[in-house]
Image (cartoon, rainbow, N blue to C red):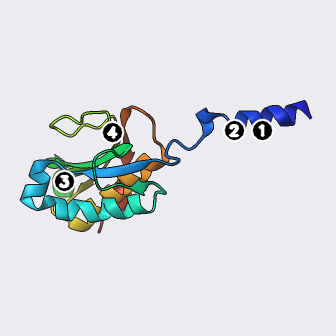
Amino acid sequence: MPRLALAIAFLATPALADPFSGKSYIIQLSSTQYSSGYGAYLLPRLAKVMAQSGLKAKNCPGADLVVNVEPAPDVGRWVGTGTNRVWLYTISATVGISPETYEIPYEGTPAFGVTASLQTLNPDRGDEMACLITLAARTALKNYRPTGIFKTDGSACLRK
């Protein structure tokens, strides 16, 4: 019986509690994302994942968490040899979750985030980028820590 009581007490400790319980969030876009219209492309996928997260949307200052998305510029390189040599682009997106008190710097680095990336023949595949944003957001919510940027394999987002 004492072991059962200890196990129940251990499970009830705040360290194992949901870090998002009762928390609210706001999605922050950079001024360039917003003014260029790129935000209209980035926001729907991120907003959909966040709406399913159990967190409360708070579309004004004072939210507990700030969520942002930063796609990286595509980088290309030759891969393979001979007739199998192809030019592949690496595309990626980082979804960040930061406390409201953390000031996200100009380049968009969050307190915590997950970067999903893949190699593709076409860097302009909107469906691949949308999938990477969804994957990074879901992975960030599932594996949240107070700090750090982690990577996840986005190859499942590759369209053939």
Q: Would you call the spot at circle 1 few (<14 residues within 10 Å), some (14-19), or many (20 or more)? A: few
The front one of 79 and 74 is 74
Q: Relative to residue 104, is residue 71 depicted above or below?
A: below
Q: Disc 4 vs disc 3: which is toward the camera?
A: 4
Q: Which amino acid is tagged 4?
A: Glu
The answer, for residue 89, to whether it is visible in the render is: yes
Left or right of 44, for residue 52:
right
Mark positioned earlier in the residue sequence (4 or 2): 2
Q: Which amino acid is tagged 3?
A: Leu
Left or right of 26, for residue 21:
right
Q: Label 1 belongs to which residue?
A: 8
Q: Disc 1 vs disc 3: which is toward the camera?
A: 1
> How many angstroms separate mark 1 from mark 2 (CA)?
6 Å
> How many angstroms separate mark 4 from mark 2 (CA)?
26 Å
Q: Check if mark 1's residue and mark 2's residue have beta carbons within 8 Å.
A: yes
Q: Label 3 belongs to which residue?
A: 88
The front one of 55 and 75 is 55
